Structure formats: structure tokens, C-alpha cells
């Protein structure tokens, strides 16, 4: 079933357009930076962008930081929101279930291809970021956020962990959207529901009055991967972010499964 | 093949299906009839494990549903509330996806039944003359059937070449073998309907559960599908056909159930449902004499009377006895017809709000049987 879902994902032009758009934004930003030479002042603007002008090796991380707040979650929410609700809306869900495909199996397959998409998107953004960064700005040993220099090998694993962390955060988004997707027959409604949850979380995260809630918001630690480029690595927020996402993912996927496995399919 | 006991489904306060006891036997071409909103589709969805029953039991192919869904549904083909596909893919690609999504047919099926539900020998040709209506699919299918069908559907199928053969075979069965690579979104309703049937036939199911399979088809297409169903049943497949097309059911089905407001109101052989009404229509110029003679017979009551026609309710008296009495009495009998209802009559009587059998000679709805059987 996973292979079938993978074929659907790969065979859909939409998938590739989304990924191309995701990779296009950082590329556009890099070109603009290169042409104008005007970067944000250090400490301002999106993470890492100020340093990118001097060193392209930081651009993969910068590219991820660019797509992370809005673009990537929207793409993931749309895709995961479509997973079950899209099939229901098109009527193909009933034909898959009577083939028969077990409901749990279908949900797991949908989740698995969502994971594939998330990793694919994050990897493509990072890879394009690296290529564009190296081409436009050249690669030097990384200066860390803390000031010291990061060796090339060191930079590789830091970037790799960053990719993993961002993908894990996006899985949290996917879990919200997948749960919403089992609640409705409209993929649009499912994606909107997931995005509403994220926007709420991001707004609360900016609100001082919500200070007590902040550590438990799903989006609170999204940008904590910046700490991976410190010496020594500041693991505290990264590991907290990881744990928070794990809880959200487990609870929401459990809810999605419980709902889908017992639901009357009337679409 | 299908047996339900007290099957009930409530959606909130609405009882969609109410204590349904269905009994579909092996080899039936079973018609499932009911007005719109009578719970037909909900029943079909419960049979297929899409909707969970509130109470009652379902048994399909001798196994409980939905507990044994994995095993049972692999041997069931279905069409529920219209076909559905991935619109950007071609018909072939759609079937290939659905085929791949199902369980691996290389694993032997549980149970004692034979690997192929189709008979080893090719079917005799359709009894209907292969006019334009029954055209291409039947004609092209026959020579191939003996050789490839049992082979393709043997439990050893599975590798890619076999899968492709299975898809091609299903397309050929519904007359779509020459469709190109156009995406399904560019197809006509009729073609989609056929593709839906092809998807149902992919794994040579033992039981077909079809909900309005001829929707959107032109008369030729309907005829082809009817022929296909009859042929499948002859080959050992059981068909459960949910439909509101009474003529269709009357033409092909061997047994039928009628539901109204979620309740079963009749379930029997179609010819029994269409049994004599107990009324005989006598056409004669001597209506007066005929009435006198008939009334003298035991248990006979006179019905509606027109200048050249008389309706007679026989109670135990054989129609031929009536005929003899009339002829012996000098009545010139032009025609004597034992009245039989059409399925439409039965259906309307059972579901039309008229509870119980229609009172004799009530000025009921215009009776199509009379119009048809009594020449003016």
C-alpha cells in the first residue's frame, strides 16, 4: 500500500510544483542578496541571512529558516490535509477500503508518504540552498553563531541534524493536518483547520500574556535549530522542541487513527 | 452468500435501516429495490464494511462482517454510488492502482472454494442474438475466454505482467479495451460507469455488489451490462444488484427484495413476486351472460365491468373452469387473461404508502397491466 501511495505522490504534478516553489523562494532571496549586496543587519531579519553574504556554506540553514515559518507548513498542511479527505471527496476512499485496504494500513501508508514528502521537501530546499549558496557566495569554513569557526565536517552533521529537526517539526504539522483530514470530506477544510491551529500557536507565541503557554506551543521551538550552529551546541531548546513535537505527533496520530478506524464512510 | 439478521443503522434520531433480514443465495442475481432514501445505499455500505451497523449481524460468503472484511472483501467486487477515480490518470493507470492496492493475489485464498469462480469451459454464447447492442464485448470475449480467463485469475497471479493482463481483461469485459491514455476526467459518464464495473471485476469476484450499475448508460450500454451480468451469473458469480430501475430488475433478476423506509417489505423469487393476482380478465361481447355464469361459480366475485370486458376474482376456482363454464354457456370468449402484476405494480403497492394488498377493485392508480394485456 505504501508503494501505491508513493506512486500517487510521485505521479502528481502538484507534488513537484510545490517542491519547486519551496526551493524557488530561497533561490530568489540568494539572487537578490548577491545582486544588491544588501543583507539584513546582523541580528535582524531571518536567521543566518546576515552572514550568508560572506559565506555560502550557511545558506542551506538560511534557506530552511526562510521557508520554515510559513511556506513549508502550508505545503505540508495542504498535502497531509488532502491525504484522507481528498480521497473521500473524490469518492476513491470507499473503493480503496473495499479493495480491501485496512483502515489502519491506509492511514499508516498516508502518513508514510507524508513523511517522504516532508523529507524530500526539506532535503531539496537544503540541497538547493547549498548549491545556490556555494555558487553565489562561495564556501568557507563556517563561522558559528557564537563567533568561533566550525570545521567543514562539523558543519555537515550540524546541517544534517537541522534537516532532521525541521522535518520532525513538519511532521507535527502533518499530524495536525492528518487528524483534521479524517474529520472532514473536504481537503480544503482539513488544510485550513491545520493552518488555523498553527497560526493560533504562532500568534500566542508572540503574546506576552500567553507566556505560561509558550513552552507547550507546537511552533515555539521551530527555529531552535539555530542553536545547532553554536559552539558548543545548545541542545536544551532543540531537545525540548523535539519532545514537544513527539507528544503532539503521538496524540494527534492516535486521535486520527481512533477516528478513522471507527468512522462511517459516507462519502 | 449474504445473510443479515436484524440489521439496523441509526444516524442520530433517524433510523436508516431497520431490522433488515436479507438472504442472498449462491448463484442469485438478486435485485435490491426501494424508493430513494429507503436505506438501500446504507445497507450496501454496511455490507461492505464502510458503515458500521448499530445492531444486527451480517454474514457474507459465510463469514461475519465486518470482522472478516479482509478475507471476504478480497472476493467481492463492488460499485457504490457511482464510480470514482483519480481524474488525472488514465483508465488503465487507475485500474492498475486499485489492483495494486488490494491484497496480494499470489497468496492462496482461504476456504475450500475453487481458485477461479469462472467455469473452465467457455460460456455458451448469449441467448440473445448479438445485435448491435450486445456487440463488441461479447463477440471479442468469447474466443479469449477459454484460454486466458481462468489462467489470469489463478491465485498465482501477481507479477507485473499478470497484473497488466488482469487490467486488460477487466477492460475488455466492459468493452473498454480500446480506450487510449486520455485521463479519466475527459471521459463521459457512461465510460466512467463501465470503468467502475471493470474495477469491480478486477479480481474475478465470487460476489458482485452493485449499486445502480447502469446509471448514465445509454440503452445499448444498459443492455450490454445486463448481458454481462447474466453471463457472470451463469459463470458462477452471485450478483447483488441495488437498483431503482424496475424494468431492469424484472428482466434479469432471479430473486429480489423490496425495502421501504429501511424495512424489508418483500423478499422472494421474482416470478413469485409477480405471481397471479387472483383476477381474471374476460373480454367478450356477451358481458351480461358471462357475469351471470361466473357469479354462479363457488367463491367467485365479480369485479369491474365494462361494455366488452369483465374482471372476475377467482377464489380457488381454476381459470380454465371459468372458461369452460363460459363457453358451455354460449359466451363468446374473445380473450381470457390471468392477470399478473408487473414489478412496478408490486413495488408501488408495497412502497407507495398503500399498506397491505390493494383492496379488490379499489379505484387505485391506473393499472398498466390492464392497458397492456387487454387489447382495446
Image (tube, grey):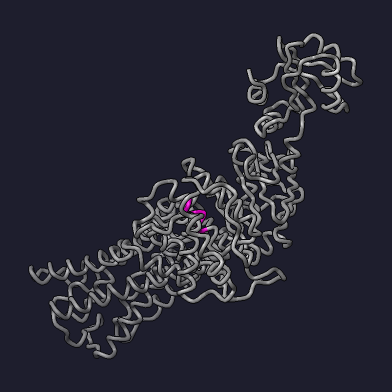
Segment colored magenta: B194-199
Q: Position of residue A233 (x, y in %)?
A: 34, 84
Query: What percent of the width, then of the height, locates residue A184?
Result: 49, 51
Q: Establish if B116 lies above or below B259.
A: below
Residue at x 26% of width, y 77% of height: A127
Q: Between residues A253 and B116, which one lies in front from this camera angle? A: B116
Residue B352 on the magenta segment: no
The correct choice, above or below, for A243 with respect to A263 in the image is below
In this view, the residue in front, B169 or A218, is: B169
Q: Residue at x 67, y 36 (%)?
A: B261
The image quarter in which residue B208 lies: bottom right
Q: Position of residue A128 (x, y in %)?
A: 23, 75
Q: Is residue B255 left or right of residue A86?
A: right
Residue drawn at x 68%, y 72% is B110
Judging depth in this view, the residue of A102 and B204 nearest the camera is B204
Classify B76 as above or below B353: below
Main secondary structure type of the part rendered in magenta: helix
- Quadrant where the C terminus of chain B sits is top right
Q: Residue at x 34, y 60 (%)?
A: B181
Q: Is residue A41 left or right of residue B82?
A: left
Up/down of B48 relative to B312, above or below? below
Query: Can you see residue B121?
Result: yes
Amino acid at each position: 500500500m505504501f508503494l501505491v501511495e508513493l506512486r500517487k505522490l510521485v505521479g502528481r504534478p502538484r507534488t513537484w510544483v510545490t517542491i519547486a516553489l519551496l526551493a524557488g523562494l530561497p533561490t530568489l532571496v540568494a539572487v537578490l542578496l548577491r545582486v544588491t549586496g544588501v543583507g539584513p543587519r546582523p541580528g535582524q531579519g531571518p536567521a543566518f541571512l546576515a552572514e550568508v553574504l560572506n559565506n555560502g556554506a550557511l545558506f542551506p540553514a538560511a534557506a530552511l529558516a526562510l521557508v520554515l515559518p510559513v511556506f513549508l507548513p502550508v505545503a505540508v498542511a495542504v498535502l497531509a490535509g488532502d491525504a484522507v479527505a481528498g480521497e473521500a471527496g473524490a469518492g476513491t476512499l470507499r473503493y480503496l477500503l473495499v479493495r480491501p485496504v485496512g483502515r489502519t494500513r491506509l492511514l499508516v501508508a498516508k502518513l508514510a508518504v507524508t513523511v517522504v514528502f516532508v523529507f524530500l521537501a526539506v532535503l531539496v530546499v537544503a540541497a538547493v540552498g547549498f548549491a545556490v549558496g556555494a555558487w553565489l557566495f562561495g564556501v568557507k569554513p563556517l563561522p558559528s553563531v557564537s563567533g568561533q569557526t566550525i570545521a567543514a565536517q562539523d558543519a555537515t552533521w550540524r546541517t544534517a541534524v537541522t534537516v532532521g529537526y525541521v522535518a520532525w517539526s513538519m511532521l507535527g504539522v502533518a499530524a495536525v493536518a492528518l487528524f483534521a483530514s479524517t474529520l472532514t470530506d473536504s481537503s480544503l477544510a482539513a488544510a485550513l483547520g491545520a493552518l488555523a491551529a498553527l497560526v493560533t500557536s504562532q500568534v500566542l507565541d508572540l503574546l506576552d500574556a500567553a507566556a505560561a503557554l509558550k513552552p507547550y506551543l507546537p511552533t515555539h521551538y521551530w527555529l531552535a535549530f539555530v542553536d545547532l550552529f553554536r559552539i558548543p551546541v545548545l541542545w536544551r531548546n532543540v531537545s525540548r522542541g523535539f519532545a514537544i513535537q513527539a507528544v503532539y505527533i503521538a496524540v494527534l496520530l492516535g486521535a486520527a487513527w481512533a477516528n478513522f478506524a471507527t468512522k462511517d464512510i459516507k462519502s | 452468500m449474504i445473510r443479515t439478521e436484524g440489521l439496523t443503522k441509526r444516524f442520530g434520531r433517524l433510523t436508516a435501516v431497520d431490522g433488515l433480514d436479507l438472504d442472498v443465495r449462491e448463484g442469485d442475481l438478486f435485485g435490491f429495490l426501494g424508493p430513494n432514501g429507503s436505506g438501500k445505499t446504507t445497507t450496501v455500505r454496511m455490507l461492505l464494511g464502510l458503515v458500521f451497523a448499530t445492531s444486527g449481524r451480517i454474514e457474507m460468503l459465510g463469514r461475519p462482517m465486518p470482522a472478516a472484511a479482509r478475507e471476504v472483501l478480497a472476493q467481492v467486487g463492488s460499485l457504490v454510488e457511482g464510480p470514482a477515480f483519480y481524474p488525472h490518470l488514465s483508465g488503465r493507470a487507475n485500474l492498475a492502482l486499485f489492483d495494486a492496492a488490494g491484497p496480494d493475489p499470489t497468496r492462496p485464498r482461504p476456504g475450500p472454494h475453487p481458485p477461479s469462480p469462472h467455469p473452465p469451459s467457455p460460456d455458451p454464447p448469449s441467448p440473445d442474438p448479438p445485435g448491435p447492442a450486445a456487440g463488441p464485448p461479447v463477440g471479442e470475449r468469447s474466443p479469449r475466454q477459454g484460454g486466458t480467463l481462468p489462467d489470469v485469475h489463478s491465485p498465482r497471479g501477481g507479477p507485473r505482467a499478470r497484473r497488466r493482463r488482469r487490467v486488460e481483461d477487466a477492460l475488455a469485459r466492459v468493452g473498454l479495451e480500446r480506450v487510449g491514455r486520455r485521463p479519466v476526467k475527459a471521459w463521459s459518464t457512461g465510460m466512467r460507469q463501465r470503468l467502475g464495473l471493470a474495477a469491480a471485476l478486477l479480481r474475478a469476484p465470487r460476489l458482485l455488489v452493485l449499486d445502480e450499475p447502469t446509471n448514465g448508460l445509454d440503452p445499448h450500454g444498459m443492455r450490454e451490462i445486463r448481458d454481462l451480468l447474466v453471463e457472470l451469473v451463469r459463470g458462477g458469480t452471485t450478483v447483488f444488484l441495488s437498483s431503482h430501475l424496475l424494468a431492469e430488475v424484472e428482466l434479469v433478476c432471479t430473486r429480489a427484495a423490496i425495502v421501504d423506509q429501511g424495512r424489508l417489505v418483500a423478499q422472494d423469487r421474482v416470478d413469485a413476486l409477480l405471481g397471479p393476482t387472483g383476477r381474471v380478465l374476460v373480454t367478450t361481447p356477451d358481458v351480461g351472460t358471462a357475469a351471470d355464469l361466473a357469479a354462479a361459480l363457488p367463491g367467485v366475485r365479480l369485479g369491474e365491468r365494462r361494455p366488452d370486458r369483465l374482471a372476475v376474482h377467482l377464489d380457488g376456482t381454476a381459470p380454465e373452469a371459468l372458461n369452460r363454464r363460459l363457453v358451455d354457456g354460449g359466451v363468446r370468449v374473445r380473450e381470457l387473461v390471468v392477470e399478473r402484476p408487473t414489478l412496478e405494480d408490486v413495488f408501488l403497492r408495497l412502497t407507495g404508502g398503500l399498506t397491505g394488498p390493494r383492496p379488490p377493485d379499489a379505484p387505485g392508480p391506473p393499472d398498466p397491466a390492464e392497458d397492456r394485456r387487454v387489447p382495446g
